[in-house]
Amino acid sequence: METQAVGRRRAGKDGHDKGGTEHTLLGDPGGCNAPFPAGEAAVDSSLLRHRGRPTVGRMSDHPPASHHLPLRECFPDVWLASSANAMSIPLGLKITFSRNMVAVRVPDGWVLLNPVRLSEGAEAELLAKAPLKHAVRLGTFHGRDDRYYVDRFGVEFWGVPGEQTYPEPSFSREITEEGPFPIAGARVVVFKKATRAECVVCLPQHRLLVTCDSVQHYDHDPLISTLGKLVMYPS
């Protein structure tokens, strides 16, 4: 597998990394580059994401699970969930692309990087292997499903301090480059000069970089719409 075109906010030709065996699983695009089964990229009209801060209270108020592809194990104890994400844009149009969660199994249970709510079946699949213990928000815009995991499973909630698009729930642990992290051996880089709180996580044992919005790659993303390709793909 090869890490290919990446760039700030969208893929760009100047960001090619041809390091051969290094891998990148990204918050918005499709990570592991193997093709997905055909016919699984349908998105219904309820998947619009609107601007503004969400308000979530009762358990019934948590956003439902969006359509997602089957869970896939990319590396030993590293699983990928690619969920459909839709965004409204001017002129009443909508673009769709993927919003990814990387689940890493550690000795005490699962660590969810860029948490995404799963279907009941997929959630049960993870729980059959280990309990859910940690949820990690790598970037401020990826917080739609964080409260679901905090409220339902009581996970320890990690994040980079700073301005948040989703102010709730509050972090129980703050992410710093020098501080603790729920995955042993992981290396964290915090974008200190970014206008929004964000970090990336490297798992050296897999030569794997897990990112959020600052680094994106949309090649082989079966959940991206035609309009999304025009907006997100490099010209």
Image (tube, grey):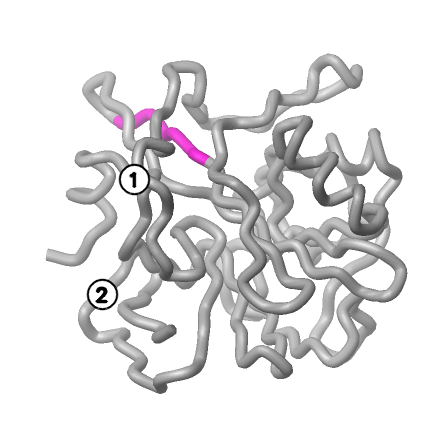
**In this figure, which residue is indicated by the disc labeled 2?**
12
Q: Residue at x 73, y 64 (%)?
A: 175
Q: 123 or 148, which lies in front? A: 123
Q: Where is residue 231 drawn, in percent x and y? A: 20, 43
Q: Which residues are magenta?
A: 84-89
**In this figure, which residue is indicated by the disc labeled 1?**
224
- Most extreme residue toward the left is 235
Q: Residue at x 44, y 24 (%)?
A: 50
Q: Total label count? A: 2
Mark 2 → mark 1, Cα distance in angstroms: 17 Å
Q: 124 or 143, which lies in front? A: 124
Q: Residue at x 85, y 36 (%)?
A: 153
Vertical position of residue 142 compared to residue 22: above or below: above
Q: Where is residue 63 drawn, in percent x and y? A: 62, 22
Check disc 1 and give the amino acid type.
Ile
Q: Quadrant of residue 181?
A: bottom right
Q: Quadrant of residue 120?
A: top right
Q: Where is residue 41 drawn, in percent x and y? A: 35, 33
> Which numbered marker is on residue 6?
none
Q: 63 or 81, which lies in front? A: 81
For label 2, count other residues whose C-alpha is less than 10 Å away and answer few (under 14), some (14-19) or many (20+).
Answer: some
Q: Of callouts 2 and 1, which one flags the residue occurring earlier in the amino acid sequence?
A: 2
For residue 88: magenta?
yes
Vertical position of residue 227 compared to residue 26: above or below: above
Q: 49 or 105, which lies in front? A: 105
For label 1, count other residues whose C-alpha is less than 10 Å away and answer few (under 14), some (14-19) or many (20+).
Answer: many
Check disc 2 and give the amino acid type.
Gly
